[in-house]
Amino acid sequence: MKKWITLTALLMAGTLFSETTPVMLSLVTPVQAPSSEYDVTGFRLSLLYGDCHDFTGLDIGVVSRTAEDFTGLGIGGVNIAGGKLYGGQVGLINWSADKKTGWADISTGLQLGALNYAEAFCGLQDGLVNISGTSFTGLQSGLVNYTEELRGAQCGDWLIVGINVASGPVYGCQIGLINYAKFMERGVQIGLININPNNGWLPVLPILNGHF
């Protein structure tokens, strides 16, 4: 306890005149040093739950949350970025609630976990369930993959074991047991059941479907 109090005092003294801290330690917010209003540029350890404003660096914890943008690598049970993600999240649940403002300003990197979610994402999502709310560019690989607009690929685990859904336009490919694309603009579907409503008089086909 004395060591914790001493370390807390040092951190508070070092950040007294700054809104940025190089180190943040948290038991359960608000029992942390410094407070969740600070940006972190460096390292954060969240023993149970930690919260901060912006983050850049290495983040390790059971549940770690960043109110705004996250840049770097997050490793833990639950990783939450309230803004955009630039880097990687590795954990059971990875969450990036970014708001898409343009193709040059969306979350970029990788998410590895049981459940991966991003509002708009460019990179790799690999897990049991992968969700990108508005748009996805890159590769989604898992048992269930969902996005609205796809530019890239969706594939099941071991390529074929999975369900791929795109509720908007697709530019790329889907590989799985069941593939659905509302608008297959340019691409192919490979799987047991391939659903492509804009493919004229053959909207549902086994093995292969597509549109160019």
Image (cartoon, helix red, strand yellow):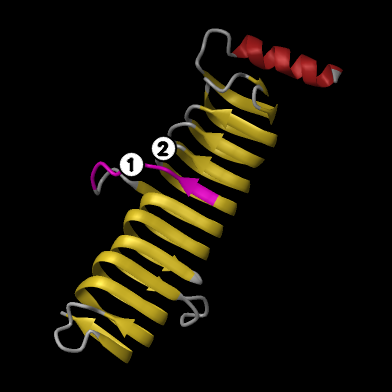
Query: Is residue 189 located in the magenta-colored stretch of the structure?
Result: no
Q: Position of residue 35 (x, y in %)?
A: 60, 19
Query: Is residue 98 located in the magenta-colored stretch of the structure?
Result: yes
Looking at the image, residue 132 lies above or below residue 15: below
Q: Residue at x 31, y 67 (%)?
A: 166
Residue beneath label 2, please? 83
Q: Secondary structure at mark 2?
A: loop
Image quarter (top left, top right, bottom left or bottom right) of the N terminus: top right
Q: Residue at x 32, y 46 (%)?
A: 106
For the question of whether residue 188 can be seen, the reply is: yes
Tell me the magenta residue range. Answer: 94-102
Mark closer to the chain start, 2 or 1: 2
Residue beneath label 1, please? 99
Q: Position of residue 52 (x, y in %)?
A: 54, 28
The residue at the far right in this view is: 2
Within the image, what quadrant is residue 122 found in? bottom left
Callout 2 touching callout 1 (CB < 8 Å) = yes
For label 2, count other residues whose C-alpha is less than 10 Å away and answer few (under 14), some (14-19) or many (20+). Answer: many
Q: Disc 1 marks which amino acid?
A: Lys
Within the image, what quadrant is residue 100 found in? top left
In terms of depth relative to the viewer, which is nearer, 122 or 181? Answer: 181
Looking at the image, residue 2 lies above or below residue 130: above
In terms of depth relative to the viewer, which is nearer, 59 or 42? Answer: 59
191 sits left or right of 80 in the view: left
Q: Residue at x 51, y 76 (%)?
A: 157
Q: Position of residue 127 (x, y in %)?
A: 53, 64
Looking at the image, residue 5 lies above or below residue 111: above
Q: Disc 2 marks which amino acid?
A: Gly
For the question of whether residue 155 can be seen, the reply is: no
